[in-house]
Image: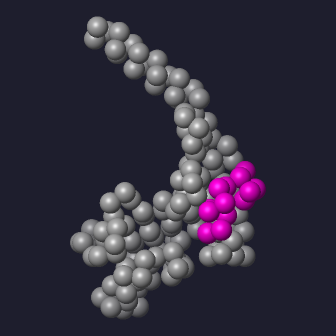
Amino acid sequence: MKKITTLLMMMLMIVGVASARDRVTRDIKALPEAAQQVINTHFKGKGVNHIKIDDKTFGSADYDVVLNDGTEIDFDSKGNVKEIDCGRNAIPDALILKPIRDYVAKNFKGQKIVGLEVNRNNYEVQLYGGMELKFDRSGNFQRIDD
């Protein structure tokens, strides 16, 4: 029985790897509507360098967008932001929860938020100097990560 289970798991992995594929495009219309709105509203005029579409086995996809200024934005299949890396530039304020913006402004004066990762249970924020801060889903500060 153990051999059959192992064999079935291996077959599922092979099918998953074989059916998963990446596509690359520059057409913003390949993104979900919500992702298009984020780019058109908050990164207007930056231009899309390329979009990597990672098709998943069961019909969903992840989207990795690189803008012409080097900004990288990852979206889930619904167009929700998963991660933003603006390099040395600040992330637009509207994309960051107000409690997080307020905390950074009060406790790290003059620092700009250049990275944001949205996880199931928390937000990870990276400041320009490299310091990483963790917040819960409501924007309450949890800790500093080095």
Q: Main secondary structure of the magenta part?
A: helix
Q: Quadrant of residue 2?
A: top left
Q: Which quarter of the image is occupied by the N terminus?
A: top left
Q: Nearer the viewer, residue 86 or 134?
A: 134
Q: Position of residue 116 (x, y in %)?
A: 44, 68
Query: On screen, 109 above or below 74?
Result: below
Query: On screen, 105 above or below 133?
Result: below
Q: With 23 as the anchor, is 7 left or right in this view?
A: left
Query: On screen, 110 above or below 139?
Result: below
Q: Residue at x 33, y 85 (%)?
A: 103
* Span highlighted in magenta in the image: 25-38
Q: Position of residue 71 (x, y in %)?
A: 58, 68
Q: Residue at x 53, y 60 (%)?
A: 80
Q: Residue at x 39, y 20 (%)?
A: 9
Q: Residue at x 56, y 50 (%)?
A: 77
Q: Position of residue 48 (x, y in %)?
A: 70, 63
